[in-house]
């Protein structure tokens, strides 16, 4: 599914420019404190602290955090901060004591250059030890199953099914991003009464750049219920920075209203998403949906965070394995083709006519060798005059580089007349000035892409041009992709470049 190149860019610059990290609001299932350094006095707090601690924000502001913690916990917190020379979050269990009342919290401490963020969620999970053992067993079991999978598709489907089982979410999807950042659902596990999104593509604007970037600092994004009233920070401006507090890597950060509207249009009340990061790139997402409010325990979220890392590593390993196998096959073909090249009477015969040939090496339906004034072809290729004009275009625009495209008619409109033969092109220049090239062709492959709703209506702007709404329908919208061939893999392009170097070396040896 991911090898279809979508011509149009659905990544919204408008959505991607919204500063999600400067909302100055949090979700109400936890509270947030901003502490100064090094005294750790409370300088800013979320307006809902009274509902957790039975103390007003005004009474809390300016007070040292040490006043509310057992001495041993405060010392542990300070020691961990002193030892950690990075802005990574520090997880803690804290008991805050206010007016003879002890409240247990799961905490995340965010050391910053100018201040410290402290996120607190009340710890209501009984039997943590049992919960840990149960979660460890689940993760261990899934890890064992992952080792038995044959490919990325099997990994994704196993993960969707198992996460649904042990979390109780109503639907779990695994998305993979295509090169244009559209998300493709490659695996799904769901309740029978929920919409089926398998194999559907969602436009890049559904997860705009700002949101994608935040997945590198947030191990997950949780919305326990879309029906919440955002909680503001008091005072509004951070007194330590004279700016809004950056909540970019805060788990409690409030959600953009347009995303809550998006969830409502999907008939979803709660959601949780986890990134799949491979080679420092956002490869995809695990997206969990629930029809009613749902707030997974901190232990369960931590288990899912660990699992998303394991899954990312497994997908990376499987894709690396597939790439190595393809490289080995192509190297074998290259070796045989080279042997043939050196034993054939001419360059074209060596590349096109033997038991191993250029078409097999690069998975082509047609190939041409334009060399020393002659043009020899195999398979389905454009006519001689058409190739002559194509080479003139290549010389003007892509002179001395290997040129690869799976959308030739888009870049070179004159080729629309022979799209059935050459919607895909790999061009290996031998002597561009003299019009000497090795050309490989792939035909148009008409492909139907199923979108989750019309991607052209993904964003509906208000007349003011500032506020906007997401699409309200996720009914399958079909788009036929034209003038496109099967995509070229990195390994195939690499094989083409290696072959070009070998041919150039042979030509030089013969001439000099």
Image: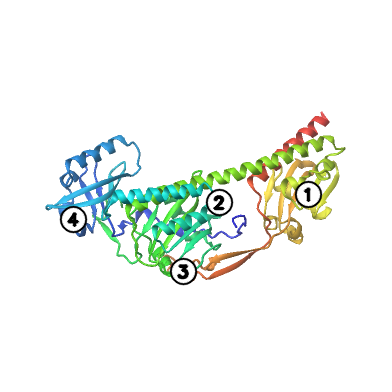
- Whichever of labels 4 and 1 marks the residue nearer the N terminus, that label is 4
Q: Residue at x 35, y 54 (%)?
A: 22
Asked if the residue at tag 1 contacts the one at tag 2, i.e. Cβ–Cβ closer than 8 Å, the answer is no
Is 446 above or below relative to 65? Answer: below
Residue 339 coordinates in the image, percent (x, y) = 79, 35
Task: Determine the image quadrant of residue 342.
Answer: top right
CA distance separating discs 2 and 3: 25 Å
Q: Is residue 16 visible?
A: no
- Give the residue at mark 1: 367
Residue that label 4 marks: 53
Spatial separation of the CA atoms under disc 4 and disc 1: 75 Å
Left or right, residue 239 beside residue 358: left
Residue 59 in the image, given as x and y percentages of width and height: 15, 53
Element carrying mark 4? helix
Residue that numbered label 2 is attached to: 152
Tell me the SS state at disc 1.
strand
Q: Nearer the viewer, residue 325 or 224?
A: 325
Q: Nearer the viewer, mark 4 or mark 2?
A: 2
> Above or below — where is 481 with respect to 374?
below
Q: CA distance from mark 4 to mark 3?
A: 39 Å
**What quarter of the picture does the N terminus occupy?**
bottom right
At mark 2, the secondary structure is helix
Q: Earlier in the sequence, mark 3 or mark 1?
A: 3
Residue holding disc 3: 194
């Amino acid at each position: 599914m991911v090898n279809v190149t979508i011509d149009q860019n659905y990544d919204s610059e408008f959505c991607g420019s919204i500063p999600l990290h400067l909302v100055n609001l949090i979700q109400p299932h936890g509270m947030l404190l901003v502490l100064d350094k090094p005294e750790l006095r409370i300088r800013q707090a979320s307006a809902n602290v009274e509902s957790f601690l039975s103390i007003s924000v005004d009474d809390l502001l300016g007070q040292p955090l040490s006043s509310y913690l057992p001495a041993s916990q405060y010392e542990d917190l300070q020691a961990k901060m002193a030892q950690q020379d990075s802005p990574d979050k520090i997880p803690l269990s804290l008991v805050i004591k206010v007016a003879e009342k002890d409240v247990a919290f799961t905490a995340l401490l965010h050391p910053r250059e100018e201040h410290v963020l402290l996120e607190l969620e009340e710890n209501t999970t009984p039997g943590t030890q049992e919960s840990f053992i149960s979660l460890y067993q689940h993760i261990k079991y899934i890890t064992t199953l992952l080792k038995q999978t044959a490919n990325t598709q099997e990994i994704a489907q196993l993960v969707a099914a198992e996460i649904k089982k042990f979390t109780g979410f109503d639907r779990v999807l695994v998305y993979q991003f295509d090169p244009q950042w559209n998300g493709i659902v490659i695996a799904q596990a769901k309740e029978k009464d929920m919409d089926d999104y398998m194999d559907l593509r969602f436009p890049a604007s559904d997860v705009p750049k700002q949101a994608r970037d935040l997945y590198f600092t947030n191990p997950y994004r949780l919305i326990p219920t879309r029906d919440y009233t955002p909680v503001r920070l008091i005072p509004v401006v951070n007194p330590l920075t004279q700016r809004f507090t950056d909540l970019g890597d805060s788990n409690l950060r409030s959600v953009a209203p347009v995303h809550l509207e998006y969830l409502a249009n999907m008939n979803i009340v709660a959601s949780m998403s986890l990134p799949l990061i491979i080679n420092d790139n956002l490869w995809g997402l695990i997206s969990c949906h629930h029809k009613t409010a749902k707030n997974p325990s901190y232990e369960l979220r931590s288990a899912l965070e660990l699992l998303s890392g394991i899954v990312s590593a497994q997908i990376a390993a499987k894709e690396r394995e597939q790439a190595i196998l393809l490289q080995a096959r192509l190297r074998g073909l290259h070796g045989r083709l080279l042997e043939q090249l050196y034993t054939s009477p001419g360059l074209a015969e060596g590349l096109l006519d033997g038991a191993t040939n250029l078409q097999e090496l690069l998975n082509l339906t047609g190939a041409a060798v334009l060399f020393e004034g002659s043009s020899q072809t195999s398979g389905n290729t454009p006519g001689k005059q058409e190739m002559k004009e194509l080479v003139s275009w290549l010389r003007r625009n892509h002179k001395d580089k290997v040129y690869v495209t799976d959308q030739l008619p888009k870049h070179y409109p004159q080729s629309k007349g022979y799209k059935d033969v050459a919607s895909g092109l790999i061009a290996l220049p031998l002597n561009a000035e003299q019009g000497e090239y090795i050309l490989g062709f792939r035909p148009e492959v008409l492909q139907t892409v199923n979108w989750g709703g019309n991607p052209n209506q993904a964003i509906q702007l208000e007349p003011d041009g500032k506020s906007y709404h997401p699409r309200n329908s996720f009914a399958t919208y079909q788009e036929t992709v034209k003038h496109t061939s099967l995509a070229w893999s990195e390994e195939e392009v690499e094989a083409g470049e290696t072959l070009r170097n070998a041919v150039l070396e042979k030509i030089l040896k013969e001439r000099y």
